[in-house]
Image (spheres, rainbow, N blue to C red):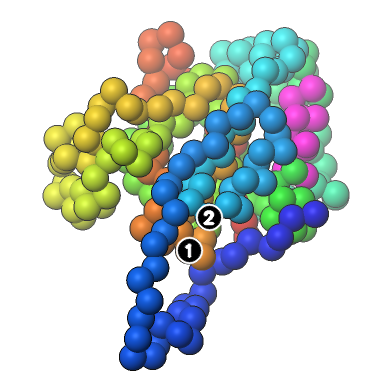
Amino acid sequence: MFARIPFRGPEQSPAFLTGPFRPVLSKPAIKAVISSNLTDLSRIYEDGVNLCVIERLMPKAVEQFIYQALQGVGSIEVSQPVDPMSFDFGRLWPQASHLPGYGAWLDDLTMLISLFCDLFECREAGLRLLSLDKAMCPRFHVDRGPVRLVCSYGGIGTEWLPEYALDRRKLGMGGLGKPDNESGLITDPTAIRQMPAFALGLMKGENWAGNEGQGLVHRSPQPTAAQPRRLLLTLDLL
Ligand SMILES: [Fe+2]
């Protein structure tokens, strides 16, 4: 259905770049796609697009399940490869399986993993499912992998920076160990974006061929008093 993901390999310099004459290559402007249409996830294949956010409304049953599960069931931490055709989703969170809406939530999870595998033509996805009460990656950064899908089920979503509001020279070591609000990385603090709860965020990383130096800059949100916990799903290529 979709083209295979263009991983960046170690020896991918085209032959014409190794000769004595090097053409000036210009990269397209970096942009994010914000949509409410699931099919727009495929726009991640466009050059210059380093993020697709698909905003979604969840059935009430799923919202209530997440709320009750985060309130009373305790934590979950799952990390494993999942083949959506054979995986027994019913065993994923047995402590929460008695709650109303568990089946509806599993249906959504199954759909997302199938969609991810379809999009990247892979049989398995690397699933992580975590309940979090603190920021897992509190500083803005880029991912080294080619692409990752994130979804905050309930609670608050991943924060990201549009290109015009950041100085990439201050990423990582360039930030000299200073916090984000002092390192100079953020050139316009009013531009910090947050993915809504239940939205899908498909984030292109540094290892997607042609995306070097253009990986999406993002970080985990700080929990708030009103939303102290969230359930985070991430899907990675294996
Ligand atoms: Fe990350």
Give the residue type that dot 1 points to: Gly
Q: Main secondary structure of the magenta part?
A: helix
Please name the residue that numbered disc 2 is placed on: 47
> Which segment is the magenta one?
104-114
Q: Which quadrant would the C terminus be assigned to in this image? A: bottom right
Q: Which mark is residue 56?
A: none
Q: Which quadrant would the N terminus be assigned to in this image? A: bottom right
Q: How many marks?
A: 2
Assign a secondary structure to mark 1.
loop
Q: Residue furthest bottom?
A: 20
| 227 left or right of 102 in image | left
Label 2 close to label 1 by CB (< 8 Å): yes
Assign a secondary structure to mark 2.
loop
Q: Which residue is pictured at 38% across the width and 76% down the height? A: 23
Q: Position of residue 198 (x, y in %)?
A: 61, 24
How far apart, in angstroms, are the residues tagged by discs 2 and 1?
A: 8 Å
| 88 left or right of 145 in image | right
Query: Which tag, 2 or 1, sits closer to the chain's start?
Result: 2
Q: Which residue is pictured at 77% across the width and 37% down the height? A: 110
Q: Is residue 183 magenta?
A: no
Q: Which residue is pictured at 46% across the width and 14% down the height? A: 227
| 81 left or right of 209 in image | right
Q: Residue furthest right?
A: 85
